[in-house]
Amino acid sequence: MDHPAVGQQLRSLRAASGQTVSMVAREAGLSVPYVANLENGRGNPTLAALSRLATALGARLDVTVILPGTGEARPAAAGPPASLVRLARTRRFRRAVAAMAGPSGVSGTELSPRLVSALAGLSAALGTEPSEADWWRLLDALVLMTVHPEPGE
């Protein structure tokens, strides 16, 4: 059975977190070919495997059961914009995530995909893809708010 939407989401999460297929497979306790096939929309993943992959990617697995004839609950997410994926692969992004992770009490590995997802959601809400400079301004503002909160808060 083919699952292109699942594969696309797995690839987007992995790319946004800056991990390789090998890193995710090792963290999830799965083989590299298995994970690569899933990302390419091939294979028949078990819920256990998807749950392990979600954990390795710092994500949460949500399962929706849809009654026949009612259609999809919602369209699959298109994934983060390409400019955001490129930004998330940089050393500067990893340093910013590490700076924000400390005060928040969340690991950088867990925070990175959440941050990319939140920024992608902002892009979708605005209906436009911010420029690289805009992404950096947003990220700098988030670091400032996280690392140097308003006194008394």
Image: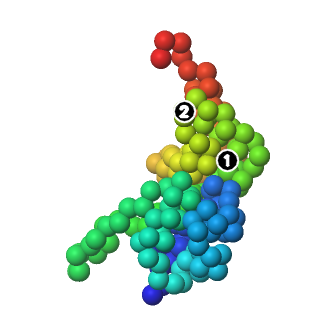
Disc nearer the start of the sequence (2/1): 2
The residue lying at 46 percent from left, 48 percent from top is 125
Q: Is residue 152 above or below residue 94?
A: above
Q: Is residue 86 above or below residue 48?
A: above
Counting from the top left corner in percent of width and height, residue 106 is at 55, 39
The residue lying at 58 percent from left, 68 percent from top is 29
Q: Is residue 134 visible?
A: no
Quadrant of the snapshot with the N terminus:
bottom left
Q: Amino acid at mark 2?
A: Ser
Give the residue pinned by disc 2: 104
Q: Nearer the viewer, mark 2 or mark 1?
A: 2
Q: Quarter-wise, where is residue 69 in the image?
A: bottom left
Q: Residue reaching furthest top?
A: 152
| Within-10-Å neighbours for mark 1: few <14, some 14–19, many 20+ | few
Q: Amino acid at mark 1?
A: Ser
Counting from the top left corner in percent of width and height, residue 52 is at 50, 65
Counting from the top left corner in percent of width and height, residue 31 is at 62, 76
Give the residue pinned by disc 1: 131
Who is closer to the viewer here, 134 or 143?
Answer: 143
Counting from the top left corner in percent of width and height, residue 56 is at 56, 59
Total marks in image: 2
Left or right: 1, with 151 as reference point: left
Whole-number angstrom distance, CA of label 2 to CA of label 1: 27 Å
